[in-house]
Image (cartoon, rainbow, N blue to C red):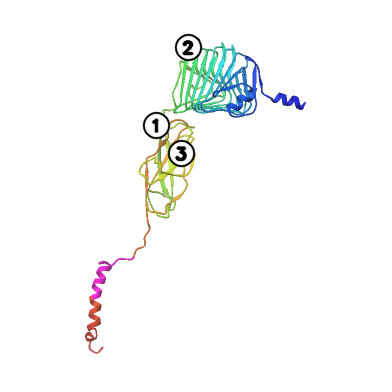
Amino acid sequence: MVLLGALLALPFVAASGGVTTVYAATDLSSWCTIAGTSYVSGTCTVSGTVTMSTDVEISSGETLLISGKVLFPILTINSGITLTVDSGGTLMVENSGTSGYDILNSGTITNSGTITIENSGGNVFGIGNSGTITNLGTLTVENSGYKGIDNDGTITNTGTITIDNSGQYGIFNESDGTITNECSGTIAIETSGENIYGLYNDGHIYEYGPITGTVTIGPAGTPVIDDSGSCSTANVSTSLYDVTTGTTTTTGTVGDSFRDTATLTGVSPGAGGAITFYYSSSNTCPSSSATTVGSPFTVSGPGTYGPSASLTFSTAGTYYWYATYDPPTGPAITSPCEPLTVTSTTYGVPEFPFGLAALFALMVPLLFVMRKWGPSLRMPGV
């Protein structure tokens, strides 16, 4: 029984049209080796179907190609499992069957690279999702089957999703499905042939970036788009305050403590990314010589973030503070420089009206006169 159990735990690779079940290994090369299939020049090629029972990462320059002609899902990602496609990595799924799923996901897919799905079946689903899909890269479904994407989970897009579908539905969002297209995201549904609905919504869709499709429809009483906001350019502004006095300020003295806050606008709810605070002696923001103030703050949408860590300056001077917003995709956005002028606290000697030098110049002749003629200047009777 022990031997039988060990044999059953080994990966099994069948011929084309069979079943491939893969256990263990995270990086693609090891994963492919355990599966008993080829890994050549960064490309892992699998024929049949694949069930991922461990986290798998497709790194930059690597490609996972899965092709089959079966009724089963070509690629199944179990609950609790994460498939990560890094920037520069590629996942390709090809299905020449007549039904089933190209990708059936109940786990987590995070794509920063390229995912391409191609099928020619009459009753095929491109992606069936009841888990979580986060797309920061490019996701393309070329589907002549039934549904391009059937979503009963959560899809968040900050990259590009393209559905080229001549079946009945480009995207079918089920009653428990949530799709959020962030400001930087684009969803394009290109439909033709017997397609009935480009986008059918029975759940929740939040459109901040553009969603384009031939037909958009929802059942009676269901909003087609739950929230559609115009995305302005993201903007970051900062506000310094003196911890010692408890007031906002642009000036202070040596020994005082200062903190900064940042206000982020022009992004959608759940935008993601992080805000980091900096200061430098250069009136250029950002500056390569800047010092990081504390740890970054995770962004969950527009709002105020901070305060930063407290900072005390021991030397007088002008220090330029700023904050940088790093979105999940695209370039970082930096606030304008906010100058903080720090001065020394001095305790000087009180000055006489004419100054010490003038006073000394008057006293020297007076002392000389008193020393020489003092006795003859006595008052009578003294």
> Residue 6: horizontal and vertical position, in percent?
72, 26
Q: Which residue is mark 1?
A: 233
Residue 232 included in the magenta stretch of the image: no
* Secondary element at image label 1: loop
* Secondary element at image label 2: loop
Q: Which residue is mark 2?
A: 192
Q: Which mark sits nearer the N-terminus, 2 or 1? A: 2
The residue sitting at 23% across, 83% down in the picture is 372
Separation of disc 2 and disc 1 at Cα? 34 Å
- Report how many numbered discs are placed on residues in the image: 3
**Magenta stretch in the rendered image:** 349-364
Q: Is residue 309 left or right of residue 283?
A: right
Separation of disc 3 and disc 2 at Cα? 43 Å
At label 1, the amino acid type is Thr
Residue 363 included in the magenta stretch of the image: yes
At label 2, the amino acid type is Ser
Q: Which residue is mark 3?
A: 275
Residue found at the far top of this picture: 193
Residue nearest the observer in this picture, 240 or 143? 143
